[in-house]
Structures are given as C-alpha cells and as structure tokens.
Amino acid sequence: MILHTRGKPGEQRPSLNGEKEGGKMSEDLRESILKYLVTVSQAKNKDVARAVGQDKHLVDKAIAELAKEGKVEYRSFGGITYIALPGKHET
C-alpha cells in the first residue's frame, strides 16, 4: 500500500506545530495576543496562553516572532519575565 503525504499542488496543509507554511505563526494567534496585551499593562507568557486559549509553546513562538518585529517587548523584574506592548507602562 502506498500512502501519499503530499496535498494537491498549491494546497496549504495545516502544520502540527501551529505554523503556516513558510514559517510564519498564525496571524490569528498573533492578533489575539496583541489584542489581549491592549487590555493589560504586562503579562507572563503562560497568562497570555491561557487568555487566548492556546498551548504555551505556540504562544511562546508567536511572542518571540512579535518581539523580533518590535510589536511586543520583554520586561524582567526580579527574575520574572513579562511581555508588554512597547511604550505601555504599568498604571
């Protein structure tokens, strides 16, 4: 028996690691993370994952990508790392 693992030409296949073909994280996940960060001054990755309803490892990858693009920033206080929107300070 022969199993074909490729889809039709031009067809995008879902990835098992949450990435779209080409390596970019799901735009929906990235957008959800940014929308959540608007509502808080800062958050830990695990809290973001809980808020957006995704596995933490997927959220970690999306946050890393957003940080590389300058859309979020990392903050460290007493050994705890938070993420926040750039320029958004705790009120």
Image (tube, rainbow, N blue to C red):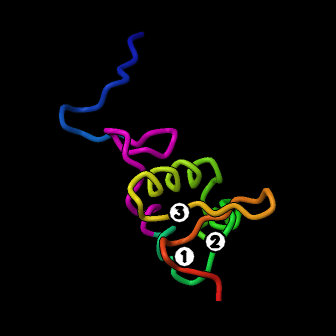
Marks 1 and 2, how far apart in space? 7 Å
5 and 36: which one is in front? 36
Structural crowding at the residue carrying mark 1, measured as other residues with C-alpha within 10 Å and reported as few (<14), some (14–19) or many (≥20) = some
Kind of residue sitting beneath label 1 = Tyr
Residue at the far left: name it.
Answer: 9
x 65%, y 89%: residue: 91
Q: What amino acid type is highlighted by mark number 2?
A: Ala
Select label 3 or label 2 by which is in front: 3
Do the CB atoms of the residues marked 1 and 2 lie less than 8 Å apart?
yes
Q: Which mark is residue 57?
A: none
- Secondary structure, mark 2, is helix
Judged from the image, the secondary structure of the residue bearing numbered disc 3 is strand
Label 2 crowding class (10 Å Cα cut-off): few <14, some 14-19, many 20+? Answer: few
The numbered mark, 1 or 2, whose residue comes first in the sequence reads 1
| Residue 28 sits inside the magenta stretch | yes
Residue at mark 3 to residue at mark 2: CA–CA distance: 18 Å
Q: Residue at x 43, y 51 (%)?
A: 68
Taking the view exactly as shown, the residue that stands out farthest to the top is 1
**Which residue position is annotated with label 3?**
73
Q: Residue at x 81, y 62 (%)?
A: 78
Relative to 65, is 40 above or below? below
Instruction: Choose mark 1 or mark 3, whichever is in front.
Output: 3
Residue 36 numbered tag: 1
Q: Which residues are magenta?
A: 14-31
Q: Which residue lies under the disc numbered 2?
A: 51
Q: Which part of the image, by quadrant, shows the N terminus?
A: top left
Is residue 23 located in the magenta-colored stretch of the structure?
yes
